[in-house]
Amino acid sequence: MDRRTFMGRLGAVGALAAVGGTAGLEALSLPVPGPFGGRVGIPRERIGLQLYTVRDLMAESLEATLELVAQVGYREVEFAGYFGRSPRSVRATLDGLGLRAPSMHTDLGGLSGLDEISEAAQEIGHEYVVVAWIPPEDRTQLDDYRRIAALLNDAGERLARSGLQLAFHNHDYVYERMDGEVPYDVLLEECDADLVAMQADLFWMIKGGVNPVDYFHAWPGRFPSCHVKDMSADGRMVSVGDGVIDFEQIFESAELAGLKHYFVEHDDPDDSREAITRSFRHLTSRN
């Protein structure tokens, strides 16, 4: 399944009714001040872009898209596919634009090609290989998550031999209780902290009814990166700064969480150029 398909499915999963819209954010102890109540506090050089946001442009020209991303002001990018380019070609384009690519996404099935992933990651300069999706058929019961944790530990150990760090990216489905337990908690408990890091997608955490800050406190140092994406009062994904998530409050716990990389993302923007520009300006307007 390609990411366009599975992200489309996710749009129908986990309505914000589970946490009661804006009232739900308040219930989670997340202030709702409107767009940015003050200084956000992300280091400018650590504001990156998940390139899935501009996949329409990447399909036309990877090189021109990365040039646009650099012109907007981003200095880091996270890949979700290389659009037919060789790792060497990708690295040359990044170097020419002064961009770094510390991270890349794959899905659970992609781990079957771990040697190829590792070679490409080292060529391009990735530090993290992030598992971003578990197909529905692979997560029908809680024991599936225990099996997945074992698979992630094994892959993480193999990648570590090449100097790479495996990570897991959440969606809202990992917070749907099974047998009285939260699958995400099972992953955190059973994955070796040294072998499997966590990438916190802030939108999907809140959409799933949990407070990111609570997880940062419960599992300090486990979250070296996050996805910064905003939510409207009725639960829709919007450009950063156009929603109600108080990123300033969340990022007060950035050091505790272990956050080093902040990737802007919008899964399905009406205008990807406008979305990445608007989000970057909001994150840097008070820095």
Image (cartoon, rainbow, N blue to C red):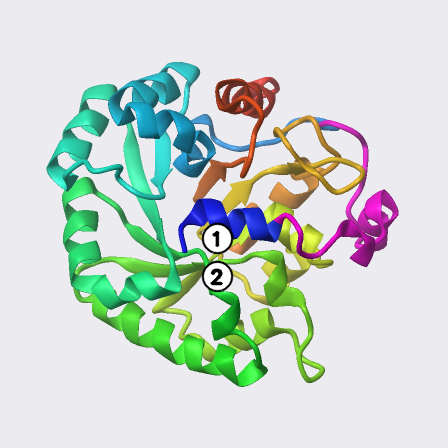
Residue range in magenta is 11-35
Residue situated in front as seen by the camera: 269 or 105:
269
Q: Position of residue 62 (x, y in %)?
A: 28, 27
Between residue 47 and residue 217, name the one nearer to us.
Answer: 47
Residue most extreme to the left: 88
Picture coordinates of residue 237, whole percent (x, y)? 65, 37
Question: Which residue does the image show at 61% across and 42% down from the upper left?
Answer: 251
**Residue 14 drawn in magenta:** yes
Label 1 or label 2, whichever comes before in sequence order: 2
What is the number of the mark on residue 258?
A: 1
Q: Are marks 1 and 2 in contact (CB under 8 Å)?
A: yes
Instruction: Determine whether the residue tagged by mark 1 lies in a helix, strand or loop.
Output: loop
Give residue 155's quadrant in the image: bottom left
Q: Total number of numbered labels?
A: 2
Circle 2: is it few (<14), some (14-19), or many (20+) Cα within 10 Å?
Answer: many
Is 55 situated above or below 136? above
Residue 274 appears at what percent x and percent y? Answer: 54, 18
Amino acid type assigned to the residue bearing label 1 in the image: Gly
Report the residue marked by disc 2. Answer: 222
